[in-house]
Amino acid sequence: MRSFSGSGILLRAILVVSALSAQTIYAQSDLSTSKEPLKVGGVAVDDVLQRLGAKQEDAVEAEELDAYSRHFDQTDFNRDGRHSREEYVDKGSFLTPQARAGIFRAADGNADGIVTRDEYVLNRVITDEAKTIVRGMDDDRDGLVEQAEFVAHAAKLLSDSKLAEQVFAAFDLNSDGGIVIPEYLRVWGQWARAGRKPAEQRIAARRAELANAEND
């Protein structure tokens, strides 16, 4: 167990965000253009996330989708249904420019420099679920999920301790034995999109499913 003050965790998170900006190996375009299924330890990453408990948009109700959409609209200052980098990162007022840049990069699923409403919504779905799952592994509630904590939980879910260690190693981008939110979200977000349909199709399909269920 490590001892971290609140300010120490925040500083570490900021440093991790800085380091991630240089991690081109995890760039969105790298995964979106890959023809081979992305795997870790020989297991497809989509399967890994499912076994860790991820349901992604399949578990989101219409009210949540609508709430995410409203939040997008609040930051869509010119009301064109899209976020440009200038609008979201340069002119945004929440968090830090660096943090906003990381969120924008993660949400921009097709790496075209524009974040649509559905891309934003899907990113919120993915990241909120990921944080819930990984925070549940932080046994000492210090804001840092250490390798021993993660592996103890993930080994049960994955039924494979070695695979759990490999997944942690993938999340631990700076290899310091602990993962914080911006660090593991960068990889989790890539895995949640790898080999999947674009955000617009995924969100539309979920809304259609919810509408059909309501009409039945």
Image (cartoon, rainbow, N blue to C red):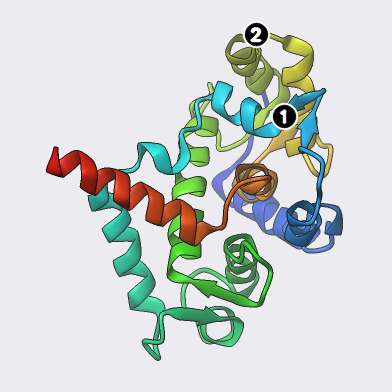
Q: Quadrant of residue 19?
A: bottom right
Q: Is residue 203 above or below residue 44?
A: below
Q: How many marks do you count on the picture?
A: 2
Q: Quadrant of residue 60?
A: top left
Residue nearest the viewer, comparing 119 with 210: 210
Q: Is residue 72 above or below residue 79?
A: above
For disc 1, the marked residue is 44
Secondary structure beneath label 2: loop
CA–CA distance between discs 1 and 2?
15 Å
Kind of residue indicated by mark 2: Ser
Q: Quadrant of residue 110?
A: bottom right
Is there a contact, CB below 8 Å, between mark 1 and mark 2?
no
Q: Residues within 10 Å of mark 2 (few under 14, many from 20)?
A: few
Q: Which mark is residue 159?
A: 2
Instruction: Using the rendered image of the protein, determine whether residue 55 is visible from the camera's viewpoint.
Output: yes
Where residue 168 sits: x, y (%)?
73, 29
- Seen in the image, is 185 located left or right of residue 66? right
Q: Residue furthest left?
A: 215
Kind of residue indicated by mark 1: Ala
Q: Quadrant of the N terminus?
A: top right
Instruction: Using the rendered image of the protein, determine whether residue 138 is visible from the camera's viewpoint.
Output: no
Q: Earlier in the sequence, mark 1 or mark 2?
A: 1
Residue drawn at x 81%, y 36% is 176
Secondary structure beneath label 1: strand
Q: Which mark is residue 83?
A: none
Q: Quadrant of the C terminus?
A: top left
Q: Is residue 181 above or below residue 27?
A: above
Residue nearest the viewer, comparing 28 with 149: 28
